[in-house]
Image (tube, rainbow, N blue to C red):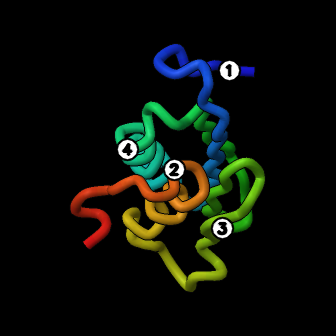
Amino acid sequence: MATNPINPDATARVEIEYCARCGFLPRATWLAQELLNTFSLELRELALVPGQGGILEVRVNDEVIYNRKDDDGFVDPKVVKQAIRDRIAPGRSLGHSDR
């Protein structure tokens, strides 16, 4: 199991499962970068998981917080950030992402 060297007490694990055949890797890596920039202290690990069938799903500690198929398309990253924040750092301001 990975440990965050900046914050060894971090426990949150985020998975981004993406459809490799659909070409969702660039979107998944961009979202991963956004999440790592925002939650570098709170995340223990962020994993990119190749999938199939048009999937683009974000999970925090095994809880699905975003599924492209459920939301009829791609979501604004600020919505994903807010959902993650609400689970791993409630009360934390996300600055412009909260507006």
Task: Name the residue type under label 3.
Answer: Gly
Q: Which residue is disc 3 drawn over?
A: 54
Q: Position of residue 63 (x, y in %)?
A: 74, 59
For badge 2, the amino acid type reads Ala
Residue that numbered label 2 is attached to:
89
Q: Is residue 23 visible?
A: no
Which label's residue is closer to the chain start, 2 or 3? 3
What residue is disc 4 on? 38
Q: Earlier in the sequence, mark 1 or mark 2?
A: 1
* Residue at x 67% of width, y 55% of height: 59
Whether label 4 touches label 1, CB < 8 Å: no
Determine which quarter of the picture holds residue 67. bottom right
Question: In the shown orientation, is residue 52 left or right of residue 25?
Answer: right
Which of the numbered marks, if any, corresponds to residue 2?
Answer: 1
- Pick whichever of labels 3 and 1 is earlier in the sequence: 1
Give the Cα distance between marks 3 and 4. Answer: 26 Å
For label 4, count other residues whose C-alpha is less than 10 Å away and answer few (under 14), some (14-19) or many (20+).
some
Label 4 and label 1: CA atoms lie apart by 19 Å
Lower position in the chain sequence, tag 3 or tag 4:
4
* Along the line of sight, the residue nearer the viewer: 56 or 8: 8
Up the image or down, 50 lies above or below 5; here it is below
Q: Position of residue 56 (x, y in %)?
A: 61, 62
| Picture coordinates of residue 24, whole percent (x, y) | 52, 56
- How far apart marks 1 and 2 lie (CA) works out to 20 Å
**Viewer-nearest of discs 2 and 4:** 2
Q: Secondary structure at mark 2?
A: loop
Taking the view exactly as shown, the residue that stands out farthest to the left is 96
Query: Helix, strand or loop at disc 3?
Result: loop
14 above or below 92? above
Q: Alpha-carbon neighbours of circle 2 within 10 Å: few (<14), some, or many (≥20)?
A: some
